[in-house]
Amino acid sequence: MRTTGFLFAISFFVLIFLTACEQGENQMNSSQTETSQQEFAIALHGGAGAISRDTDPEIRDAYLASLSEALEIGTRILDEGGDALDAVEQVIRFLEDDPLFNAGRGAVMTNSETFELDASIMDGRDLNAGAVAGVRTVRNPISLARIVMEDSPHVMFAGPGAESFAEQVGVELVDQDWFFTERRFEQLQRALERDEVMLDNSQLEQKEDIDERKMGTVGVAALDRNGNLAAGTSTGGMTNKRYGRVGDAPIIGAGTYADNNTCAVSATGHGEKFIRNSVAYQICAIMEYAGTTLNEAANVVIHEKLEPGDGGIIAVSKTGEIAMVFNSPGMFRAAANSDGYREVAIWE
């Protein structure tokens, strides 16, 4: 009887899991599934959040054009036999220099009207990873994160230590004015105005505009012709953040993860939620231990583990399957593969 009951429990668990996968697949916002091995594939995002469909057409088209150019940069590198890590770094550098996004130039501002930038990168070949948090003068934090990965025995440097390391290795440094945009300054002023009527920090976080908290973080996942996966993420964080707050973008396993045995993932959304749920790693783990496809795993995590509006992910599997899954109204995203598939989109 005990054996029968145990087998019934296991069968019931498997049924529930497969049902969740099926429901998640039906709710899929954007994906591209492959049944055969791709020679290369790439997916990228520019943030997820409450992106209104009533957005000014000129602004919408500017985002789509930038995403398209970023996709072309990464696709060209991979098509010519380049390394997945190079594709990830170069695409993110392009997005960090584009003031449309919340990364590098165009990053959101802290409560004290400064900029604190975070980034991470991971190599699927050996699980090597590098990250920086709270850097203030590094033009392209993703490149510094890669140097941390390749030229140091550590995974993450933060704050003044990361700045010292940046000076030592000779990455390009800029004044804080480089990151400034009028749009982000105005966002901060609106947030500071809300401060005046709030009683404590927990209420302040609850009153942040979803649009200003979640949009703009950038990330890339790529598979190259050698079968290697890589992922990276870069962000300016949250408007009006304080006390050196760090989100999921530089946290390996939360905002970024890559493993040649499964997939490469970059996340965007409510950082605290993605940290608590180890989103990027959990997607890889579900693939490895439950034997699911990338899209099945991504949908379980985004639609079952997280709450509506938390954000989304882009990911590429070891076979070149692409997932771009989100539970927010929109996510700036683009993807391409060696078979000629290409997508640039914002909404479902």
Image: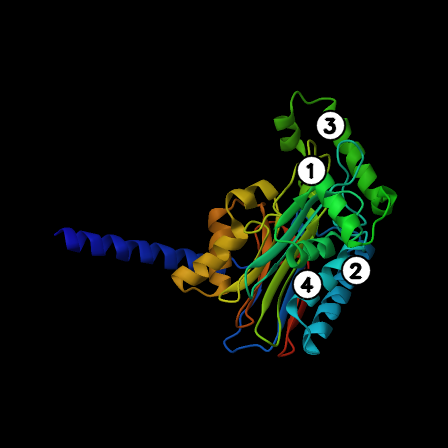
Q: Relative to 245, say whether 130 is above or below.
A: below
Res 111 → quadrant: top right
Q: CA distance from mark 4 to mark 2?
A: 23 Å
Label 3 vs label 4, nearer the camera: 4
- CB within 8 Å, label 1 to label 2: no
- CB within 8 Å, label 4 to label 2: no
Q: CA distance from mark 1 to mark 2?
A: 23 Å
Question: Looking at the picture, how far across and down is residue 227, in whole percent?
Answer: 57, 73
What residue is shown at x 59% (from left), y 55% (from top)?
313
Give whichever of discs 2 and 3 has the lower sequence position.
2
What residue is shown at x 67% (from left), y 77% (from top)?
81
Q: CA distance from mark 1 to mark 3?
A: 10 Å
Q: Write down the residue under mark 2.
A: 61
Q: Write down the residue under mark 1.
A: 209
> Mark 1, residues whose alpha carbon is within 10 Å: few (<14), some, or many (≥20)?
some
Secondary structure category for the residue under label 3: helix
Q: Relative to 66, say whether 217 is above or below.
A: above
Question: Looking at the picture, how far across and down is residue 204, in whole percent?
Answer: 66, 28
Q: Write down the residue under mark 4.
A: 88
Q: Write down the residue under mark 3.
A: 194
Q: CA distance from mark 4 to mark 1?
A: 30 Å
**Disc 1 residue type?**
Asp
Res 133 → quadrant: top right
Residue 340 appears in the figure: yes
Pick the residue in front: 153 or 322: 153
Give whichever of discs 4 and 1 has the lower sequence position.
4
